[in-house]
Amino acid sequence: MNPSPRRSLIVAAGLCLAGGWLLAQPNSPGSRTPAQVERTQQRIDALLKLRMKPEPLPVTLPNPFQVVSGSATRSEGDAPVVPAETPVDTSADALARYVAKLQIGGLIRISGQPQLFINDAPRKEGDFLIVEQKDAVIYLQIMKITSSTVTFRLNEATLTVKF
């Protein structure tokens, strides 16, 4: 029950005609204009050029701790410059503002010493918490932990918080 050779010949001729018709189509993916090829090559170059041929590092690297021009600079004898519209915070105001940003969790006892989870880390009496500000790093000290309160200290100011 072999198919007739005539039928196979007709199918083969039809496939050849269909293939030739597809190749002749101007919008087919295989036929690109030179402008399209060049634009694609430019995109590839733009994306991969820096990766394939990176620019060398400068011979002398800049100092990351150096004050750049345009920022506030002062000499040893100058007083710090405080803008008139900026209110000067007291330690108590600053302490209240920083403590409000802390996440105080549960109370645990390790070796008989009470500890609190503050910002997802266990803290005990006497530990310092580091609070980062835009232009400074502030250290808050945990003075006392009881079963329902914790006392923080910043400079001379203290603040007791219930949890």
Image: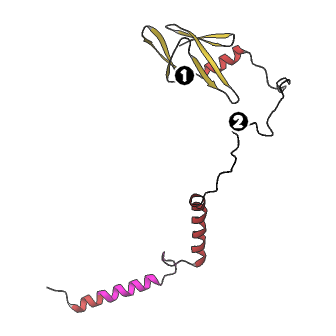
Check the picture and name the quadrant holding the N terminus. bottom left
Q: Judge depth for marks 2 and 1 and give the one in front.
A: 2
Q: Please check the rendered image and state whether residue 18 is part of the magenta-colored stretch, yes or no.
A: yes
| Vertical relation: 116 (above or below) 112 | below
Report the Cα–Cα distance between label 2 and label 1.
32 Å
- The residue shown at (66%, 22%) is 138
* Residue linked to disc 2: 65
Range drawn in magenta: 11-32
The type of residue carrying mark 1 is: Gln
10 sits left or right of 66 in the view = left
Report helix, strand or loop for mark 2: loop
Q: Nearer the viewer, residue 159 or 52?
A: 52
Residue 75, percent from left and from top: 84, 28
Identify which residue is drawn at 44% across, 81% down: 22
Question: Compared to 9, does 133 lie above or below?
Answer: above
Counting residues from the start of the chain, the first of labels 2 and 1 encountered is: 2
Q: Which circle marks residue 28 in the picture?
A: none
Q: Is mark 1 on a helix, strand or loop?
A: loop
Counting from the top left corner in percent of width and height, residue 36 is at 58, 74
The residue lying at 61 percent from left, 63 percent from top is 46
**As drawn, is 74 to the left or to the right of 20?**
right
Residue 87 within the magenta-colored segment of the rendering = no
Closer-to-camera residue (14/54)? 54
- Crowd tier of the residue under label 2, counting other residues whose Cα lies within 10 Å: few below 14, some 14–19, many 20 or above: few
